Image (cartoon, rainbow, N blue to C red):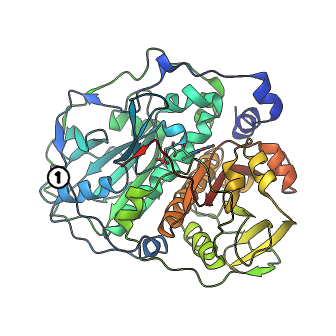
Amino acid sequence: MNWRGYHEATKHSVESLRRSRHFLDWANMPDPFRHYEGAPVVDLPAGPPSPDIPALEVLLGARGPATAADGAEFLSQLLFYSAAISASKRAPGGGYRYALRVNPSSGNLHPTEFHFLTRGLRGWTDGLYHYRPSSHMAEQRAAGALDPLPGAGAAPVVFVLSSIAWREAWKYRARAYRYCLLDTGHAWQSLALAARAIGCRACALGHFPDDEAARGLGLAADEWPMLLVALCDGPPRVDPAGGAEPVWHGGTPNRLSPEEIRYLPLEEVHAASKPLKGAAVPVADPPEEGAGALRLPAPAASASGFGEVVRRRRSALDYEGGPRGMTLPELSAILEAATQPLEADFAARFVQLYVYAHRVEGVAPGVYRHWPARAELELVRAGGQQVAAAGLSLGQDLAGNACLAFSMIGDVGRATAAHGDRGYRYVHFEAGAIGQRLYLAAEALGLRGTGIGAFFDDQVHRYLGLDESGPKQVVYHFAIGHPVPDPRLDG
Ligand SMILES: Cc1cc2nc3c(=O)[nH]c(=O)nc-3n(C[C@H](O)[C@H](O)[C@H](O)COP(=O)(O)O)c2cc1C
């Protein structure tokens, strides 16, 4: 099944929801934490210092100073501000608590695992590691000089973000592949922005041979490598020691559920998106053709420090619904932060933002298309959009009660023309990356965001005047506003 077949088969509609009701089997819920049992566990120093460069500056391209003295401090700081546990919540009606992390995840199911390869970090043994967010430690899966990732170059630290699709499929069934890709995009930017805040460059590589990488990394069969993120310039280095023979510890992956249920369309689209079409060639951005009606002003500023913003970031469960709104310079800052160029071998602007403006001072309610190079908003539909935004987002009130909501429209046709079915992944990585940037920009400005993976696909297309089976497809929704308090949240 190619991307088109998968995408059509996993569209939500009123009929599809009615046709196939799904009840969650709690006894079979996958463990959100993977462990490679038996691999030596290495401590990461507790209480790493908070990067205090303003988060908005990082989002707009600034780099913080490199402060870590050695590899352990560096990795601890990087992971504490990108992938660690940052809060917990009480389950409804009980004392049971579950963990929330710095990186968000659809359904809080966290399909993404963080593996990393290190070479020549000061005071840290070269090798292959897997991050354990449950205890902020690293499992050493191999020690020595390894080069299992063709094309990743000689960066001192290379992360491999893998997906365990079953974690998502337990809840979202075949549609779960979309969520895995979006979550990968979130994790990528969570990592890349934390790296930048502590003085590094981070470049993502989507164009690598999956099976070779999975074998070379000794990944468990249920983990699929999705994206590599190479960190350079900033990590504290010594000259590479020059290749100690690798020693494999491997470790035995823990079993996540009593029973894993397979969803063929999900497996088929993953297989279809494995082949690499030629070399990774950046695709030129399309010309911006819109006739902008509203010019965006200079963006609002915020001094909130990066470390504080990423650790307090949360998803709003719902929003106030009024009368408080937000300002146009705040919207301008959010849009500018969300649409900065991304450093990746597949990077291109495949995703365009449509804004459902509910309560933005100086902006008449309506749907607007964003033209980032021109810093303009073009009116697509005039009038109140609260009912439409909530309805299109599978009837979720939060999309109507927020100050604004977004549809992200991905040009999957252009991405797949350039990259084959693998382009389907890249469009979703970009949408997830934009989502992560929206979360952090909102939080920096004292607002809050929520990613929305559930929407009625073709209703969105019809509402926005797009062809239902055309090259441009809705891939993600998002909302931003003033959150209602969440009484179940701790820390
Ligand atoms: C790709 C993606 C899709 C999501 N879809 C929804 C959604 O449809 N509705 C919703 O209320 N929250 C949604 N969320 C928010 C998650 O439920 C939230 O990230 C998760 O519960 C963890 O909470 P946290 O973001 O506060 O860490 C989504 C998040 C992501 C990353």
Residue nearest the observer in this picture, 389 or 170: 389
Q: Position of residue 229 (x, y in %)?
A: 41, 55
Q: Position of residue 385 (x, y in %)?
A: 80, 59
The N terminus is located in which quarter?
Answer: top right
Q: Callout 1: few (<14), some (14-19), or many (20+) C-alpha neighbours within 10 Å?
A: some
Residue at the far top in the pictured view: 258
- The answer to whether residue 133 is above or below residue 399 is above
Quadrant in which residue 288 is drawn: bottom right
- Amino acid type, mark 1: Pro
- The answer to whether residue 175 is above or below residue 352 is above
Q: Could you tell me if residue 277 is visible in this image?
A: no
x 21%, y 70%: residue = 67
Q: Is disc 1 placed on a helix, strand or loop? A: loop
- The answer to whether residue 288 is above or below residue 212 is below
Q: Quadrant of ligand 1?
A: top right
Quadrant in which residue 50 is drawn: bottom left
x 77%, y 44%: residue = 457
How many labels sit on residues? 1
* 454 lies left or right of 306: right
Q: Position of residue 45 (x, y in %)?
A: 17, 52
Q: Is mark 1 within 8 Å of ligand 1?
A: no
Q: Position of residue 329 (x, y in %)?
A: 62, 79
The residue wearing badge 1 is 45
Q: Could you tell me if residue 401 is visible in this image?
A: yes
